[in-house]
Image (cartoon, grey):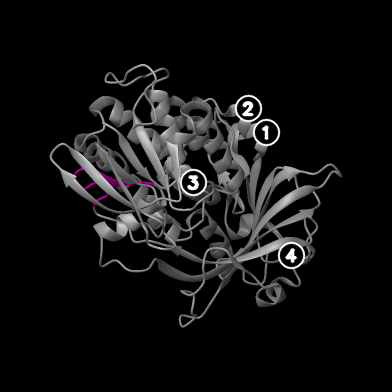
Amino acid sequence: MTVLIAGAGIAGLTLALSLQRAGLPFRLFEAVGALRPLGVGINLQPHAVRELHDLGLAQDLDRIGLRTREVVYFSRQGREIWREPRGRAAGYRWPQYSIHRGALQMLLLERLIDEAGPEAVRMGAAVSGWEEGADGIEISLEERATGRALGRARGAVLIGADGINSTIRARLYPDEGSPSWGGTVMWRGITRGPRFLTGRSMAMAGTKACKFVCYPIADLEDGGSLINWIADLARPGDHDWRPQNWNRPGRREDFAPRFAGWRFDWLDIPAVIAAAEGIWEFPMVDRDPLERWSFGRVSLMGDAAHAMYPIGSNGASQAIVDARILTRLMLEHGPTPEALAAYDAARREEVNAVVLANRGDGPDRILDIVAERAPEGFDDIEAVMPRAERQAFADGYKKTAGMDVAALNARPAIVPQGAVWEGSTPGAGAGE
């Protein structure tokens, strides 16, 4: 009754750790030979943080991340459009975190190995195919770089948590092709810079076509901040984005001139860009919402199921919630096709709505609305977009993304504390 998981990203690791706690046997396979703390900053919303707290990671999150206190939107001219509290300051029972993606991934990996042992994760083994039978599923494994066969493994179900370029999804949807590009390229970087605003603020300025996002992910001993930032620029429809990989080094000259005059009283953006320790270039891509995630003994989760634009800080958060809901349903149904079908019914339409909302620029759409109404800037935001309209705009996205304060605070735990699968045996966890 082993759960086979393809992919040791945030989704796959959260699922594996949740299954370990629930006494459900699993095996986790990762295509790369060794995980390293790659990537840049992400935000974890309270609905995801709640799940990580339930996994006992509260102190660890405070150690490796910062509690986000507020989000602030600014016009291209640096004038404040909207400011709202986040996390506990907003009334949630759980914080929001600004955190390095790689640090979170390594934390989950370390906790999993601590509890399930190093054999819980098989590195350098990509799932290349599978055969499904009446009583289980058998997967084929290979070395990704060479295609060398690495044997097979048997289990009860297979979960594809192998990212936006998922091999599992490609087999389920062989005609889908490449991710969908929305016309924007992002340059992302990390800079040792000054504290700005509250020192725990997430700031966004500009419009969809030219936007700068920044937030601290660590405090520095000199009183400054380690600032994670993203510069978005629209590109022509014939821009050749496909040859780019997800870790391509970026060049300042390709985007920095568009932000040359963005020196505001709350942050000198050209200085932040100039001082970056590293810059990476990414196309802003997602995938079309699917009509189905679960097929018999196979299902998808995380980016493999619902890759979305990095707007509204929801990609990793939704993946964590996927893992927890799937765990609960396996507790109820066992690792069976019935559990996967129930997971599909519980999650797919809800998360597809977030994918589509992010395509419409999610909560960041407020920047373009204000720019359309006041292209030369404004002195009084109330005359451009009254507070009630701004509040309704922000609240609407929260409801779509499962971030409504009252609803989240009142909802029971996804996985009941101490719940253990009735079919478990002492020492169950990492499967054979």
Which quadrant does the C terminus fall into? Answer: top left
Majority secondary structure of the magenta segment? loop
Asked whether 99 or 144 is in front, the reply is 144
Name the N-terminal-most of marks 4 and 3. 4
Check disc 2 and report the residue beneath it: 59
Dot 4: element: helix
Q: Residue furthest bottom?
A: 238
Amino acid type at mark 1: Arg
Check disc 1 and report the residue beneath it: 63
Asked whether 317 or 407 is in front, the reply is 317
Check disc 3 and report the residue beneath it: 316
Q: CA distance from mark 4 to mark 3?
A: 25 Å
Check disc 4 and report the residue beneath it: 273
31 to 98, vertically: above or below: below
- Badge 3: how crowded within 10 Å, few (<14), some, or many (20+)? many
Residue 296 horizontal/vertical position (percent): 19, 44
Q: CA distance from mark 3 to mark 1?
A: 19 Å
- Badge 4: how crowded within 10 Å, few (<14), some, or many (20+)? many
